[in-house]
Amino acid sequence: MGTNKDKFRTRESIRSRQNIDMVISLHGRTCKTEGKAQQKVLNEHLQRILAVTVGAG
């Protein structure tokens, strides 16, 4: 079955994945409108989120 801890971990990873999807879609939209400087900032944010997510997983 799976303990409460497993359920919590699954819920957390789903939330993390949703955050990543949101950032990626924002990232795509921003690249079209803002250009390279904004893209660089978003890349840094994305890497920070991925690092946290992988660390938590």
Image (spheres, grey):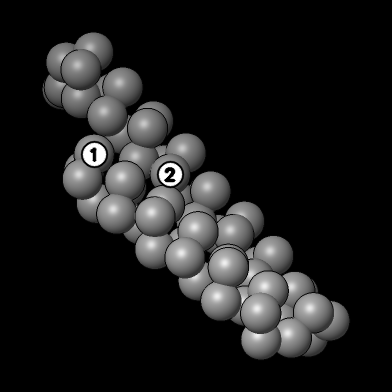
Q: Which residue does the image show at 29% across and 54% down from the upper left?
A: 51
Residue identifier under label 2: 16
Disc 1 packing (10 Å; few <14; some 14–19; many ≥20): few
Residue 2, above or below 55: above
**Label ID, residue 24:** none
Relative to 4, is 43 on the left or the right?
Answer: right
Label 1 sits on a secondary structure element that is helix
Disc 2 packing (10 Å; few <14; some 14–19; many ≥20): some
For badge 1, the amino acid type reads Ala
Q: Residue furthest top?
A: 4
User: Can residue 24 be seen here?
Assistant: no
Which is more toward the observer, 34 or 19?
Answer: 34
- Alpha carbon distance from label 1 to label 2: 9 Å
**Label ID, residue 56:** 1
The C terminus: image quadrant: top left
Relative to 18, is 31 on the left or the right?
Answer: right
Which is more toward the observer, 32 or 15?
Answer: 32
Mark 1 vs 2: CB contact within 8 A:
yes
**Tally of numbered tags:** 2
User: Can residue 8 be seen here?
Assistant: yes
Residue 48 on image: x %, y %: 39, 55
Q: Which residue does the image show at 43% across and 44% down from the upper left?
A: 16
Residue 52 on image: x %, y %: 31, 46
Q: Which residue does the image show at 74% across and 86% down from the upper left?
A: 35
For badge 2, the amino acid type reads Ser
